[in-house]
Image: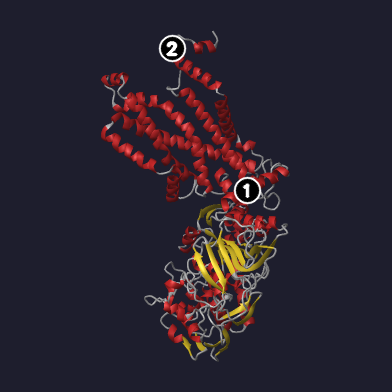
């Protein structure tokens, strides 16, 4: 035992030496929150473009959206920059009234003009998240007519159909609907870009923190917004340090060089549980882990094979070992916490049943398929676990590793057999997932809309119609029922083996309090943190 | 007369006796070098383990049990070296992995050595523009660091053990070409070559029958010394996910899989690391010993 510890600590020291490039101090300053996270996914700080995990979280802490929801109870929607709103009789116009006497970090007042500017700007710039507003029938061409200022503090938001009100409202809780300081942004406008080039690396918001500095692959520094209209944040600074190695994060946390470690592995969590200086905070996220099986593959297109695959994943073992503490078993396409989420998990590992199903499909001797696998440790480990259980039913699963870009490109081009992936909802309305797992208006290779069902070449006219219908249903109970029926159908017949829902885990020093871990990354909030 | 006396006879009566006698003397020389013998023993054990893997391995190298045997420490019951994150027995994986390691080494040597020899001897023998073209091409390949070039090739060919072997071979031949050329230059103007030429032998025959055999000993030394490097390159590719693919028990890939557990479950990465270390050491010692006995300049 002693020897093992000695070896472990030797390895630890070696790691420490390699992992701390900057001068180490024993404790972080009392007014500064230091987090270690892998922040290499940030490509822009403009809310009209932000669509990545890390940047979303930063936007959530530095910008304010029109409306928001309680992270503990997603169905409780309330105004943030907006004070109130009314939906017109025909359900096609929402009239917003802004909160009075609020200012941006620059000192400029927040008015309806800024809100209209921000939404129109997002649609016209047409970056990755623009579709969230665009799906309500607002295009770059008609944006100026659809989003109209009606007074100093009021504006109308028009849609092309009477969408379910909750869908429209949840869309406006996404980071893309953040309110941007029009005056400041337009000061930096160049070539009619609405200040996009400048905002990519700068800040024009009104949240509890301001973005002070972003050094790619090094750090992001947030500072307290002294002009914040709400309650001032106790922390003067929040610093994100880019530390990709999970073991380095763990060691820094144990030493007190950082306050929060964001990428701990299941093993790290288990080991840190007993440390009195450290506590583990977790929150259920909306992201789902799933396998996508291409219907272009001759074996996977057989319904019995698709069923059999669902019996060949050891759901519990994966959730309790490799991903212990970081996921929970979930098999429907709406994550727990969403309206209409179906929380039953009918599938378990059952080799005999799978074999019977394969025999029924005329494949009693099994077959060989490939699986494109992102070469991160967790995804690779889960893929190997599935490889083992599938081998027991005679299915040879060949793992093709690649980095995220390679595997995703292949998946998007529909040239995979099986893809092991992770799907994060774009906003908190069930339509976000329904419109990708159960929606495929055009299954041809040239289709313009490319949801997950399309990527897996799953032709589903009925479910597509059902998704469209649910999007327009205004009665929440009825809508939930429609989604439950769709989920059961996808579960039974679909080309997706959904096996887990993510739980985000943060390792914190024991003196850190008040961290809010929400269902989506922009809901993670540090404005109330004390230490 | 004992066999030994026959072999060591100062007056061999046949060519065969002379040749065997020479080999025996080399062996006697070699045997005196303790470290070299140690290296030879390691390599022999590796070969035996690879041959008898199915009988030696206590468990299936590919199938583990997540629920019961995950991350067991070394010396656990039934798992001498512990188990990895998929619940697979590390000892069994190391034993099966020796086959992959040996196959990589053997194939690379079989591919790279003849190519290097051919290019080098041809360039050295003909000289002139043939020499310039071949050697400049060799320089081009040599200009890149081995691992980087192998990485580029694997990236282009696609990951996999076969492609890794091809990529390593492509990067491994230039030193042999250089060596063979240098040796060839020293003997191309010798009298016996001139004599063979006078008898009407064609260049191909001269190179193959008279030049290549004389280059062999230095190339063998170099190849043996390079074997450790080949193992490390293969492990490096495996570590980066470009060599053997999961679930194959390739040692480099095993280290990559274990590095996430380094702090708490050190054995997952350490055991394959030790295996690579020991085998590389074995090949290096063996190569050193061979150089001592085969290198004509060192012979007294």
Q: Which mark is residue A423?
A: none
Camera-side residue of A260 and A518: A260
A309 and B223: which is toward the camera: B223
Q: Chain of mark 2?
A: B
Q: Position of residue A113 (x, y in %)?
A: 48, 85
| Label 2: few (<14), some (14–19) or many (≥20) C-alpha neighbours in 10 Å | few
| Residue B207 visible from this viewpoint | no
Q: Is residue B220 above or below residue B252?
A: above
Left or right side of A204 for B95: right
The residue wearing badge 2 is: B14
Look at the numbered discs 2 and 1 and tell me whether their residues touch, using CB distance below 8 Å: no
Which type of secondary structure does the marked residue at label 2 adopt? loop
Q: Residue at x 69, y 49 (%)?
A: B69
Image quadrant for the C terminus of chain A?
bottom right
Q: Pinpoint residue A154: horizontal percent, then vertical percent.
A: 52, 89
Which quadrant of the rendered structure holds the N terminus of chain A?
Answer: top right
Q: CA distance from mark 2 to mark 1?
A: 65 Å
Residue A251 x, y percent position in the rendering: 63, 54
Locate residue B206: give its quadrant. Answer: top left
Q: Is residue A163 visible?
A: yes
Q: Which residue is mark 1?
A: A13
Position of residue A390 measured from the top left corner of the image (x, y, whole percent): 60, 54
Identify the secondary structure beneath mark 1.
helix
Q: Nearer the viewer's eye, disc 2 or disc 1?
A: 1
Quarter location, residue B34: top right
Q: How many marks?
A: 2
The chain under label 1 reads: A
Q: Look at the picture and state if B109 lies above or below A381.
A: above
């Amino acid at each position: 035992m002693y020897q093992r510890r000695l070896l472990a600590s030797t390895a630890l020291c070696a790691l420490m030496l390699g992992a701390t490039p900057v001068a180490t101090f024993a404790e972080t300053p009392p007014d500064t929150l230091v987090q270690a996270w892998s922040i290499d996914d940030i490509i822009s700080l403009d809310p009209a473009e932000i669509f990545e995990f890390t940047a979303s979280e930063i936007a959530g802490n530095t910008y304010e959206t029109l409306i928001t929801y309680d992270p503990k109870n997603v169905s409780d929607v309330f105004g943030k920059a907006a004070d109130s709103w009314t939906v017109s009789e025909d359900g096609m116009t929402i009239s917003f009234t802004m909160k009075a006497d609020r200012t941006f970090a620059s000192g400029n007042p927040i008015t309806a003009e800024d809100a209209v500017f921000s939404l129109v700007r997002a649609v016209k710039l047409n970056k990755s998240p623009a579709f969230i507003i665009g799906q309500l029938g607002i295009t770059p061409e008609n944006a100026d007519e659809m989003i109209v200022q009606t007074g100093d503090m009021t504006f109308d938001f028009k849609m092309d159909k009477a969408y379910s009100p909750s869908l429209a409202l949840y869309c406006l809780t996404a980071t893309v609907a953040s309110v941007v300081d029009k005056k400041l942004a337009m000061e930096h406008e160049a070539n009619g870009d609405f200040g996009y080039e400048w905002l990519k690396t700068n800040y024009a918001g009104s949240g509890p923190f301001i973005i002070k500095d972003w050094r790619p692959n090094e750090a992001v520094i947030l500072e307290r917004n002294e002009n914040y209209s709400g309650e001032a944040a106790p922390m003067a600074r929040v610093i994100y340090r880019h530390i990709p190695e999970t073991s380095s994060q763990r060691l820094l946390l144990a030493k007190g060089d950082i306050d929060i470690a964001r990428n701990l592995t299941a093993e790290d969590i288990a080991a840190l549980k007993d440390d009195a200086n450290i506590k583990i905070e977790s929150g259920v996220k909306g992201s789902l882990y799933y396998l996508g099986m291409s219907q272009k593959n001759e074996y996977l297109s057989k319904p019995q094979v698709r069923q059999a695959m669902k019996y060949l994943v050891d759901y519990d073992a994966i959730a309790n070992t490799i991903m212990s503490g970081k996921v929970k078993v979930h098999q429907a396409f709406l994550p727990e916490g969403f309206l209409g989420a179906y929380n039953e998990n009918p599938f378990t590992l059952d080799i005999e049943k799978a074999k019977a199903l394969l025999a029924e499909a005329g494949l009693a001797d099994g077959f060989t398929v490939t699986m494109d696998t992102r070469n991160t440790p967790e995804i690779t480990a889960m893929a190997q676990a599935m490889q083992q259980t599938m081998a027991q039913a005679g299915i040879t699963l060949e793992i093709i590793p690649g980095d995220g870009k390679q595997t995703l490109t292949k998946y998007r081009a529909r040239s995979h057999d099986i893809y092991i992936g992770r799907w994060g909802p774009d906003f908190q309305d069930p339509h976000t997932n329904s419109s990708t797992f159960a929606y495929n208006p055009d299954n041809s290779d040239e289709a313009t809309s490319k949801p997950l069902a399309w990527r897996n070449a799953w032709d589903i006219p009925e479910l597509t119609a059902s998704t469209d219908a649910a999007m327009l249903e205004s009665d929440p109970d009825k809508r939930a029922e429609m989604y439950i029926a769709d989920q059961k159908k996808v579960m039974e017949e679909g080309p997706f083996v959904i096996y887990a829902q993510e739980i985000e885990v943060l390792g914190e020093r024991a003196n850190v309090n008040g961290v809010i871990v929400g269902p989506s990354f922009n809901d993670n909030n540090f404005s109330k943190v004390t230490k | 007369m004992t066999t030994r006396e026959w072999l060591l006879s100062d007056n061999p009566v046949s060519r065969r006796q002379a040749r065997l006698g020479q080999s025996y003397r080399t062996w006697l020389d070699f045997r005196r070098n303790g470290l070299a013998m140690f290296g030879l023993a390691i390599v022999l054990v590796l070969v035996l383990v690879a041959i008898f893997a199915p009988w030696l391995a206590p468990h299936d190298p590919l199938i583990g049990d997540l629920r019961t045997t995950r991350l067991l420490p070394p010396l656990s019951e039934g798992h001498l070296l512990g188990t990895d994150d998929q619940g697979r027995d590390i000892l069994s994986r190391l034993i099966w992995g020796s086959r992959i390691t040996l196959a990589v080494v053997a194939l690379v040597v079989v591919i790279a050595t003849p190519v290097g020899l051919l290019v080098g001897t041809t360039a050295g023998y003909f000289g002139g523009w043939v020499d310039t073209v071949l050697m400049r091409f060799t320089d081009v390949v040599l200009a890149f660091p081995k691992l980087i070039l192998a990485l580029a090739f694997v990236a282009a060919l696609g990951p996999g053990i076969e492609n890794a072997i091809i990529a390593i071979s492509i990067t491994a031949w230039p030193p042999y070409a250089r060596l063979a050329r240098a040796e060839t230059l020293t003997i191309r103007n010798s009298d016996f070559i001139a004599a063979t030429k006078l008898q009407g032998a064609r260049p191909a025959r001269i190179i193959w029958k008279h030049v290549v055999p004389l280059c062999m000993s230095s190339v063998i030394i170099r190849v043996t010394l390079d074997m450790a490097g080949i193992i490390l390159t293969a492990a490096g590719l495996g570590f980066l996910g470009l060599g053997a693919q999961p679930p194959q028990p390739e040692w480099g890939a095993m280290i990559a899989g274990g590095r996430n557990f380094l702090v708490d479950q050190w054995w997952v990465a350490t055991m394959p690391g030790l295996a690579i270390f020991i085998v590389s050491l074995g090949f290096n010692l063996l190569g050193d010993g061979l150089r001592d006995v085969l290198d004509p300049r060192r012979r007294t």
